[in-house]
Each structure stands twice: as C-alpha cells, then as structure tokens.
Amino acid sequence: MKSCFLILWTVLSTILLLHAADPAAEKAFVEKFKTAYEGKDTKTLESFLYKQGAVPMALEFYKMRLTEGAGGKIASIELTDLSPEDQKKVEGVQEGPGGQKTRMPIKPTKKLHVKIDTTDGSGSGSATSSMFVAEKDGKFVIPVPVPAK
C-alpha cells in the first residue's frame, strides 16, 4: 500500500512540474511583449495571438486591443496566476460578438496585466488592460475565443 502511494505521489509531482511555467520563459514573454508594444511592432504583437478556429469578429477585436496605443510607454507589466474567478471564466462558455457563444480554444493558465501611462498637452492619464495567456507548444500565447459547441 505504501509503495502504491509513493508511485502515485511521484507521478502527480512529475505532472505538476511539467505543467509549471518556467520563470525564465515567463520573463522572456513579458519582455518580448513590452519591447514589441513600445516599439510599435504590431506584427510581433499579433504573433502572440493563438488564432486557430477563432471567431473572426473576436480576432479583429483582439488585434485592435493588442495594437491600440502601441508605441506608448508601458508603466507596468506582469504575468500572474489566474484567480479562482478567472479559472471559472476561462473554463466556461461566454457570450461573444453578436451574441454568439464562445469558449477558449486552449486553457489559459496566466493573465497578463499591462498599465500604460499617457501624457499630452491636455493632461495625463493611465489605462490598464489584462488578457488571458496560455502555453502552446512551449510558448506563451493569447488565445482568441472560438465558437462553443
């Protein structure tokens, strides 16, 4: 009985380690995103999108959301674990563009938070946005919703 428990514990530990994000990979993703955003590199920003099977209106929205304001200075950026509320949201069916039911094509495990500070002749302000991030084939991507079946 004790050996069965040990085997089970080893298997579970290995699975958890394999699914744990590599801190160096997380840092590289955040830095690449920041560099692309501040450099107004819309091609690289759009390359972060996981588009397979995406709802066309959702894809256009995600592209706009990623590139809007590109070239500005990022005040803060961080990749965090999902909250329990976020977990429920990404596992469920959501209402998408035009009332269409959508879901995430791959399961997000992180959330990217970006804060942009702006200053112009009429004053200053800030905007914060966040988006879900998943791992696919060893790299971080921003999944775009697909039709729910």
Image: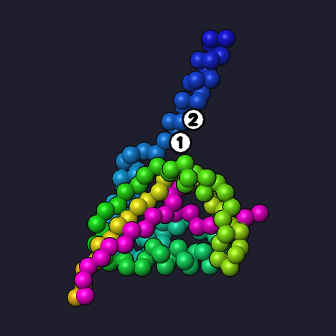
Residue 11 location (% of width, % of height): 59, 28
Q: Residue at x 65, y 77 (%)?
A: 97
Q: Nearer the viewer, residue 106 or 99?
A: 99
- Give the alpha-carbon distance from disc 1 to disc 2, as whole Å: 6 Å
Question: Majority secondary structure of the magenta segment?
Answer: strand
Q: Residue at x 54, y 29 (%)?
A: 13
The image quadrant where one finds the N terminus is top right
What's the magenta region?
122-149
Q: Is residue 91 left or right of residue 139?
A: right
Q: Residue at x 35, y 67 (%)?
A: 115
Q: Is residue 19 left or right of residue 92?
A: left
Instruction: Please indicate, yes or no, whether residue 135 appears anywhere in the rendered image.
Output: no
Q: Nearer the viewer, residue 106 or 82?
A: 82
Q: Residues within 10 Å of mark 2 (few under 14, many from 20)?
A: few
- Please tell me whether residue 47 is drawn above or below residue 30 in the rendered image: below
Pointer 2: what residue? 15
Q: Is residue 101 left or right of residue 64?
A: right
> Which quadrant of the view contains residue 126?
bottom left
The image quadrant where one finds the C terminus is bottom right
> Which quadrant of the view contains residue 6?
top right
Residue situated furthest left in the rendering: 121
Pointer 1: what residue? 19
